[in-house]
Image: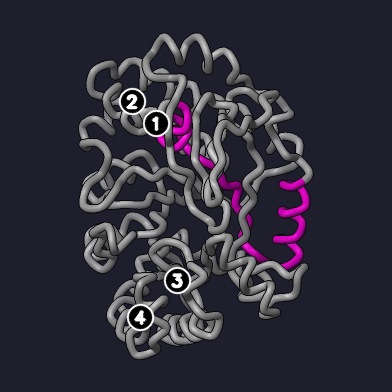
Amino acid sequence: MTGKERMTRILRHEPVDRIGLYEHFWGDTHREWHEKGYLRQDESFEAHFQFDMQECWPFTTVADLDFKRQTVAETEDTITYLDGNGATLRQHKFHDATPEHVDFKVKEREDWERLIKPLLKAEPRRINFEAYRNAKAEAAKAGRFFVWSGINVFESIHPVCGHENMLVGMALDPDWITDMAQTYAKLTVDLQTMLFDQEGYPDGIWYYEDMGYKGSPFMSPAMYDAIIKPSHTHTIGFAKEHGLPVIMHSCGYVEPLLPHMIEAGIDCLQVLEVKAGMDPVKLHRLYGDRICFMGGIDVRALYSNDRAVIDRELEAKVPLMKQGYNFMLHSDHSIPSTVMYETYRYFIEKGLSLGQY
């Protein structure tokens, strides 16, 4: 059974030979494992570990495509810069991490309408047609399930105005944030239409949409329904019109939002961040008849580099999560460089042995 065949059947809850396999890695892990010779310099992680899937992230949704990044401050360890969204960000130089949000030109509706919204046009130069074409062909040759990947509306908004301004806006000026969400939803669908008409459709769609933090989502279910869900329904609906299953990545504790995300049309919830409070076995019991799951294996077990700890984590989850043919092996976030290569190899072997049908 090829990866494409396996993933297609898993996303339909149909019998397969084993659970699915995919993973994300921090950039430091990529560099270190290549430098140490575990992978050839030209070898992808998908090929090396024989993953069932392959992604391509071909869109640029930064507002000002012509803006050249400007350095505004620099220390021995960090660089602070202004980007094309009018955001000031601080990035570590020597390790891979999400940039720190320092400041934003967009703080309220008028800033958005004046500085950003007029720039968000569906132009071909926002699309890397070649990268998509090559990744699609590579996945087809290897028999992998190929997904278009990109951010959805929540992840599009906060790089422009920051989480604080966005969440305050959701409470005090919901029409403003709704307009932002609808604008980015339309931009995404328009760009997808442009790309897929020219290069063909993928096997599925993967949206990144971090809507939670430790112990809580960023918004109530009612606020999600009123402001974000209509745009999710728009973007996910476009995929469904073309027969494409939708995987939704969402870090943090998003359990209260999950029934509403299912109503919006997702087929799979990815990452299931245990350290944020997510309980993958509970979620599988509650919603496993409606969606698939990818992740939920506590990455802290892996970076212990202790095989007994990894065994306990996998044995407690995989036999239960694989019931219903709707589970894909993946950590609950991404693999850091503190995980030894041999440890990750063992994790795959043990996890897949438990995941046989």
Foreground mark, 3 or 2, reads 2
Q: Residue at x 48, y 68 (%)?
A: 335
First along the sequence among labels 3 and 4: 4
Quadrant of the rendering where the C terminus is positioned: bottom left
Which residue is identified by label 4?
314
- Residue 310: image quadrant is bottom left
Q: Position of residue 170 (x, y in %)?
A: 28, 24
In this view, the residue in front, 276 or 12, is 276
What is the residue that sits farthest to the bottom in this orientation? Answer: 308
Name the disc covering residue 165, or none. 2
Identity, as a three-letter code, of the amino acid under mark 1: Gly
What is the residue that sits farthest to the front in this orientation? Answer: 76
Question: Which span of residues is magenta-colored?
Answer: 131-160
Q: Residue at x 50, y 70 (%)?
A: 20
In this view, the residue in front, 87 or 294, is 87
First along the sequence among labels 4 and 1: 1
Q: Are marks 3 and 1 in contact (CB under 8 Å)?
A: no
Which residue is identified by label 3?
329
Q: Are marks 2 and 4 in contact (CB under 8 Å)?
A: no
Which residue is identified by label 1?
162
Is residue 60 placed above or below 40 in the rendered structure? above
